[in-house]
Amino acid sequence: MQSDQHLRQTLREWKVEAPLPPRFQEQVWRRIELTEAQDRTPAWVRIWERMSAALARPSLAFSYITLLLAAGLLAGYWQVHATRAQADENMGARYVQLVDPFLSPHH
Amino acid sequence: MKRPIIVLFAGIALAALAYCGVYYSGTASCCRMPKGNAPELTWLKQEFHLDDVEFKRITEMHSAYLTGCAERCRRIDQKNEEVAHLLAASDHVTPEIEKALKESALLRADCQAKMLQHFYDVSRTMPPDQGRRYLAWVQQQTIPSDSHSQMHH
């Protein structure tokens, strides 16, 4: 409580003596206008702006391409694994049908 | 402004290329197989790591087995027709029907025994560990089935 009063007292006595930067007010209004303009921009445009800004940086562009390349390779590998397993299962079933007369409809 | 677009689409194109490349190179052999000659045996060769000599021997055994199998199937069909004829001519189980049914069961049992013998012969032609694996797999596929009710001969 006492410290609050002390703080208020200090603030009342505090004088800013440093000069404002040049065209301070103009800068403030420009920022306000910019913020308002950004609020009116569609979300996808803002996302694209951020994305293109990120992709313009070589390190991020390289990471992005590497990540997508790895994703493509992994997805392909996974699909190959699933397709081969399915093909193996089908061929196994066909072999069994061929040799088991109680399953085969054609011999 | 152009560069981020190029990077964006290059990433997508590379991912698609990588996917297609891996997929087509990885599935080329298994997709070609069904179009080839005796794809089931080609599959057997790949699955149980058979060399050319083992494969040739198994192919011969397979061919001989199928020939015998067709003959046994013909005899079973003949017996089934005989049973059907006897059943149509009677309103109770006569000694002839009983005898024909027993003979039919014997033919089926013989057919199944020959099939199992073929599996043993094939497994012995394979390398020992692959033979054991083949035998376990093929018996699991054939023995538990309710085979008599599914017979199509």
Image: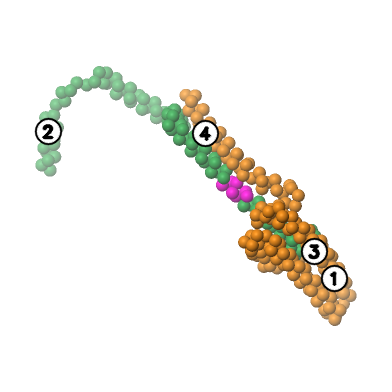
**Drawing shade for chain B:** orange
**Chain letter of the residue beneath label 1 in the structure image:** B
Whether residue B138 can be seen here: no
What is the tally of numbered marks visible in this picture?
4
| Secondary structure at numbered mark 2 | helix
Taking the image as shown, residue A103 lies to the left or right of residue A58, namely right
Residues under labels 3 and 2: Cα distance?
107 Å
Does residue B50 belong to the magenta stretch?
no
Q: Nearer the viewer, residue B83 or A26?
A: B83
| Secondary structure at numbered mark 3 | helix
**Drawing shade for chain A:** green
User: Do the residues bearing badges 1 and 3 touch, measured as CB atoms within 8 Å?
Assistant: no
Residue that numbered label 2 is attached to = A10
Q: What's the amino acid at mark 3?
A: Cys
Whether residue B4 can be seen here: yes
Residue that numbered label 3 is attached to = B69
For mark 1, does the 10 Å Cα neighbourhood hold few (<14), some (14 to 19), or many (20 or more) residues?
A: some
Please tell me the numbered disc located at residue B79: 1
Looking at the picture, how far across and down is residue B51, in whole percent?
A: 68, 54
